[in-house]
Image: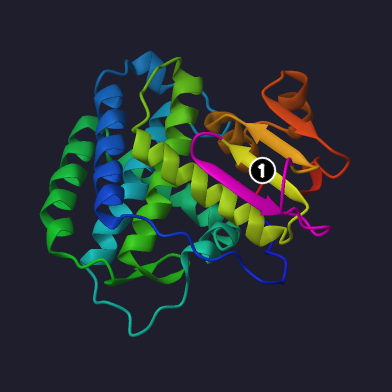
Amino acid sequence: MASAAQKGPRPRPRRYDAAKTRAAVLAQFGNVHDAVRDLTPAQLALPTHLWDWTVRELAAHVSMAVGAVIRCLEQPAPPKQEVTLLDWPFATAPRATRISEDTKAIAASAPDLDALYERTRARLAELLPAAPDDRLLASRVGAMRLDDYLVTRTVELVVHTDDLNRAAGLAVPYDRQALATCTRLLADALAVKAPGGSVEVRVPPYAVVQCVEGPRHTRGTPPNVVEADPLTWIRLATGRTDWDTAVDDAKVSASGERAGLVGLLPILR
């Protein structure tokens, strides 16, 4: 999904409230389920901007992304952690082809998407309460803690909710906690990819990070500031829109000679 992060000191890992993350995953998956249940055959056949996926395949992918938690919990825990939360954004790109193949297989094998979502929600509700936050999961990218993996599921859910809304002309709502968590992880990933303190990236009301090598700002108004709303930031960070388009459309503001992020985005594809 993205190029490897640059070497350098990492920002202190952000702490996420595990209970709130669990609730956010379930809430946003429920929001998507409510919309998918009502999709017509014509809407399901619509194209998306993701590979050659249709809306049906996109909807199947959302269920697969959440169902991955179930598959991991049904397997034995790995012996040791291999991947941290801030490793995840840079570890998925080599697996994109396999993910697309698996998505198409699930879409083809599950003609009743409502039933697929119902099974996924029920099984997750059954397994999740008994699983401790530090339980290790054998994810696609390596062994991760459950609480970290659930943070990555908010990214999957929020990003693909936006994809679904745009492809099918829907207005699926965003759970506030899921949107905040997704925004913060992608902002922190930028700080990992471009460590430094010369540019301040603001995504109100959820995230502020400093990044890019150069003079570090300590007091007053930073000389280089980038600001965007959460959805615009998420689209930039995941390649759904490009920097120049966002600036031209006044969806992002950038002040200062170092404030352009063209060469650093997207972070996740």
Q: Confirm whether the magenta stretch covers residue 207.
A: yes
Q: Which amino acid, by three-letter code, is at mark 1? A: Val
Quarter where residue 247 is shown: top right
For label 1, the SS is strand
Q: Residue 138 location in percent, x, y? A: 36, 71
Residue appearing at x 60%, y 36% in the figure: 233
Q: Residue at x 46, y 44 (%)?
A: 182
What residue sits right under mark 1 in the picture? 201
Does 206 lie within the magenta span? Answer: yes
Is residue 166 among the parts visible in the rendering? yes
The residue positioned 50% from the left and 34% from the top of the image is: 205
Q: Is residue 207 left or right of residue 30?
A: right
Can residue 265 be seen here? no
Q: Residue furthest bottom?
A: 79
First to last magenta residue range: 204-221
- Residue 79: x and y, percent? 33, 85
Rendering coords of residue 219 (x, y %): 72, 50
